[in-house]
Amino acid sequence: MRRIRLIIDEGPAEYNMALDEAMLILRGAGLISDTLRLYVFNPPAVTIGYFQSVSKSVDLNFIKENNIVVVRRPTGGGAVYHDTSGEITYAIIVSAELAPEDLVESFKFLAGGVVEAARILGAPAEFRPLNDIVIGGRKFSGQAQLRRLGAVLQHGTFMYDTNLDVLAKSLIVPNIKLKEKSISSIRERVTTISEYLGRKVSKREAIEALIKGFEKALNAELIESELSEPELALAKSLEWKYRSKDWTYMRP
């Protein structure tokens, strides 16, 4: 059985994005092993995809009034609200040999742990191409990916009890996307594990389910570990980028 390192931590948005990028670089250089990281954004934040416009993706007045940080990810995809008390983000960093070459198949394979975790908790989750995971047709997880130097970083959300009203007020979704789904608002498009089950799922439950889910999906044993000095040092050196307005607002 494959062994994959497990890291569980939390931190501010700039730290989280810097560490994900640092781990991708170090995995590509063969300096760390395949790793699954489960983490929380603290304080709450919005991350936007590398190719997105900030003003077209985020309600800047609302997030400023509510002290929500916004930062650009190194990966693509859409804007995401990260609720400290209701969402866990996963990042899986592996050799490119482990992930299918086909983009959709790689999204599906590497996010398999999210599907399994939701099912463990009692929610019948399904993967929906290109990169969503849904329950009853409503999204509770989105994925984004970056490949570099023979390694793959995929990270995504696990909304177990996200405040969906705050999410809906923080993000802007183009009307064309809503029309494609035959809905009138973001709130109709998304859900959480807690909302579906009709009970409050705890952070502990969510983490335990994710660990079991990824072990099953990847046919691997997860070994909890600590971050290495090279990871911490490289992440620290990259944090300036994710704090920079030049980076975040490169596409205003």
Image (cartoon, helix red, strand yellow):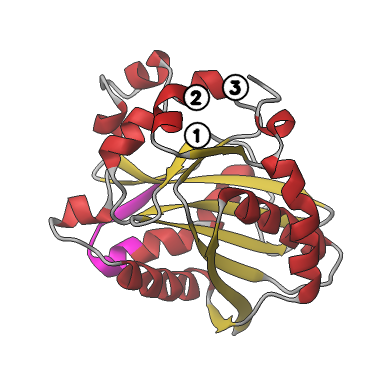
Quarter of the rendering containing residue 167: top left
- Please report the residue visible at 66 percent of the width from the left and 32 percent of the height from the top: 248
- Please report the residue visible at 33 percent of the width from the left and 16 percent of the height from the top: 179
Q: Earlier in the sequence, mark 2 or mark 1?
A: 2
Quadrant of the rendering where the C terminus is positioned: top right
Quarter of the rendering containing residue 35: bottom right
Neighbour tally class for label 3: few under 14, some 14-19, many 20 plus, Cα within 10 Å: some
- Residue for badge 3: 53
Q: Position of residue 173 (x, y in %)?
A: 41, 23
Q: Which mark is residue 240?
A: none
Secondary element under disc 1, as helix, strand or loop, is loop
- Please report the residue visible at 62 percent of the width from the left and 44 percent of the height from the top: 103
Q: CA distance from mark 3 to mark 2?
A: 6 Å
Asked if the residues shown at circle 2 and circle 1 are in contact, with their CB atoms under 8 angstroms apart, the answer is yes
Q: Is residue 130 visible?
A: no
Secondary element under disc 3, as helix, strand or loop, is loop
- Residue for badge 2: 57
Under mark 2, the amino acid is Ser
- Residue for badge 1: 79
Residue 226 in magenta?
Answer: no
Under mark 1, the amino acid is Ala
* Foreground of the two, 251 or 179: 251
The reply, left or right, for residue 245 in relation to residue 83 is right
The reply, left or right, for residue 126 in relation to residue 107 is left
- Please report the residue visible at 69 percent of the width from the left and 31 percent of the height from the top: 245
Q: CA distance from mark 3 to mark 1?
A: 10 Å
Asked if the residues shown at circle 3 and circle 2 are in contact, with their CB atoms under 8 angstroms apart, the answer is yes
Residue 126 in magenta?
Answer: yes
Q: Earlier in the sequence, mark 3 or mark 1?
A: 3
The reply, left or right, for residue 196 in relation to residue 221 is left
